[in-house]
Image: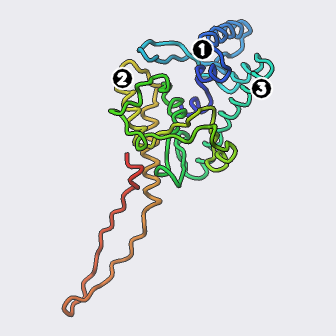
Amino acid sequence: MQNQLEQTLDSREVAEMIEKDHSKLLRDLRRYEEQFIEAKIGFNEFFRESEYKDSIGRTLPCYRITKKGCEFIAHKLTGTKGTIFTARYINRFHEMQEIVARQAQEHKMPWFIRHIPEKWGGYVILERDFITLTGVDIRKHWEFYKEEYFRGGYDFNGFATCDTCDLEEFKRKYGFDYGNEKILRFFRLHGAIKAIEILKSDKAVNLLPGAYETLIRGIKETVKSYSRKEEKPVKKPESIMVEGNVLPLQVKVIVEPAQEIIC
């Protein structure tokens, strides 16, 4: 499942990238499927059928689009639109690949958890990665961030708008692209747990298979790893003198995870 999540984009996201109505993109993909089948070319290497729930609970079709599929779509576009889409999808795939490679070497963290040491407890999950992981575009549900569910600034927050930040400096500092969002929203780890619990309890929402388990397990592993790094060595018991007798002095030290990442 992890490889599939890392190597595909939702057709709704691709539709936004190419500034095309999603229904029209689906029409094109179905036409490609017929042509691929006729030519005996593996369609699933490019596009994979999927579905999602919209804001009123309807089950609607979409596709998971691989890097090959994005390349195919890019070749169908011309001029500036093709150039911009190529740059956007390459950035998205490179971003995911860089995250996986860097985290495997440094922290062995799940691909969807970002490490930002100086802010927000160090670990966050970008909204766009949460969407990729779960298959649910929470941006389409305007009521999702209701105050009765989340505390703004505590459970979730966001980076400054794209218009006011240096994109190259942002990538150099944090190790990933800002992307196309006006506000790059993210969850802190406890906020991400709240979010996926809400989706799991909603019978009208279809999470991608294994998404809940993957997120919970990833957060637990990250917190456990972080806690180990925060542990301090405990000195051997020293001795104190009490009325001429030497008694061992034992101090029980309890090291808890940083408050910011307690789930």
Tag 3 residue: 83
Q: Residues within 10 Å of mark 2 (few under 14, many from 20)?
A: few
Residues tagged 3 and 2 counted as in contact (Cβ below 8 A)? no
Q: Are marks 1 and 3 in contact (CB under 8 Å)?
A: no
Residue nearer the viewer, 88 or 253: 88
| Dot placed on the residue nearer the N-terminal end, 3 or 2 | 3
Q: Is residue 164 left or right of residue 58?
A: right
Please give the residue where the numbered disc 2 appears in the rendered image. Answer: 202
Against 222, residue 133 (above or below) is above
Q: Check residue 73 in the rendering and tell me which mark sits there, or answer none.
A: none
Gap in angstroms between the C-alphas marked 1 and 2: 24 Å
Q: Which mark is residue 22?
A: 1
Q: Residue at x 72, y 19 (%)?
A: 73
**Circles 1 and 2: CB atoms closer than 8 Å:** no
Identify the residue at horizontal 56%, vertical 41% (top origin). Answer: 160
- What amino acid type is highlighted by mark number 3? Thr
* C-alpha separation, residue under disc 1 versus residue under disc 3: 20 Å
